Image: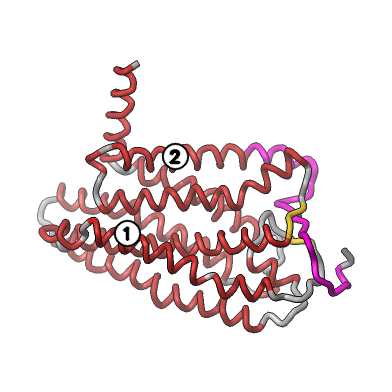
Amino acid sequence: MNPTNHTSVDYFIIVGITDLPQLQIPIFLLVLLIYFITLGGNMTIFLLVCMDRQLLTPMYFFLANLSILDMASSTVTLHKILTSFISGATMVSYTACVLQMYVWASLTGLELLMLTAMSYDRYVAICKPLNYHTIMSHKVCALLASVCWMWAFIECLPHTIIIINFSCYRSNKINHFFCDILPLKNIACSDTSLLNNLILASVIFHVLFSFPLTFIPYIFIIATILRIRSSIGRRKAFHTCSSHLTVVILLYIILLCQYLRPNQTDNLDSNKLFALFNTAAVPMLNPLIYSLKNKDVKAALRRKITYLYKKC
């Protein structure tokens, strides 16, 4: 399609990470390796939480939810890189592209909300340990998780409806490796002012709601930890929160670099690097960060391996 034409489209062409032939195989192998590690790590944590009774706590309940959405977000975004290399097909239908954008945007918002719920769980565990199981009951945890899932997918519906009603595009080539909202907005010749306002409203919501509710509890958590007299107690309390705090800081930094950049840089290839790190590296690092620094997860894994070994 000629970039100067203004017309509706039935399909989009995904440019991918790079069009250099010599880099196609290394990128494919790297993405494939990351994807397998992501699926393996998150599936391991999810199964351990479901199968090990000692992990049936609110903390690991939310961690299992995080594992589910990490597997989903990686599959939604990375599958096109893998399938296009194998089949050579870089086209995606208009409907599939919009659906991918909607699911990815919803899962991104969901991860921010889920990390907020996990932050509240850590606050109750450290600052109100005697009332922990009363406050974070099974019903409360299920309610928090349900609200996070529903709100994330409802929040992105208006953005998706606006894009569906776009009447024309300047091109059908998306300079990205999946259908994201910014690349789609940038090639639209329809009026995007309402979409820009909705994107801004979503950013403001997470800045004023998710961000404070995620980090403010850590002010009270740190103050409580510093009041613990035992060095062993302080170390144990810190380790229960450091993994979650590491994931939160990592995710917010990547999202800020990816979406809160000047408009003129939206189409630069460098933006793909932030997107690739967000869609591939973060879901891969989440289970590694939680498992490598978590004695409960490592102990549960050893118990299951020992059980399977004896059974065989």
Residue 148 versus residue 198 in the image, above or below: above
Badge 2 density bin: few <14, some 14–19, many ≥20, Cα 10 Å: many
Left or right of 272? Residue 240 is left
Q: Secondary structure at mark 2?
A: helix
**From where the camera sits, is residue 270 visible?**
no
User: Which of the two labelled residues, at mark 1 and mark 2, occupies the earlier sequence position?
Assistant: 2
Q: Residue at x 32, y 42 (%)?
A: 49
Front residue of 92/294: it is 92
Q: Residue at x 44, y 60 (%)?
A: 111
Left or right of 166? Residue 134 is left
Q: Is residue 5 magenta?
A: yes
Between the residue at mark 1 and the residue at mark 2, the CA separation in whole angstroms equals 19 Å
Q: Which residue is mark 1?
A: 118
Q: Residue at x 47, y 59 (%)?
A: 251
Identify the image quadrant of the N terminus. bottom right
Query: Residue 207: percent from the left, percent from the top?
Result: 44, 75
**From where the camera sits, is residue 76 visible?**
yes
Residue 203: image tag: none
Give amino acid for label 2: Gly
Q: Which residue is mark 2?
A: 41
Colour scheme of the picture:
secondary structure
Give amino acid for label 1: Met
Query: Residue 259: percent from the left, percent from the top?
Result: 58, 68
Front residue of 305/168: it is 168
Report the magenta residues as a range.
3-29
Badge 1 density bin: few <14, some 14–19, many ≥20, Cα 10 Å: many
Query: Residue 35: percent from the left, percent from the top?
Result: 56, 41
Q: Quadrant of residue 129?
A: bottom left
Left or right of 294? Residue 129 is left
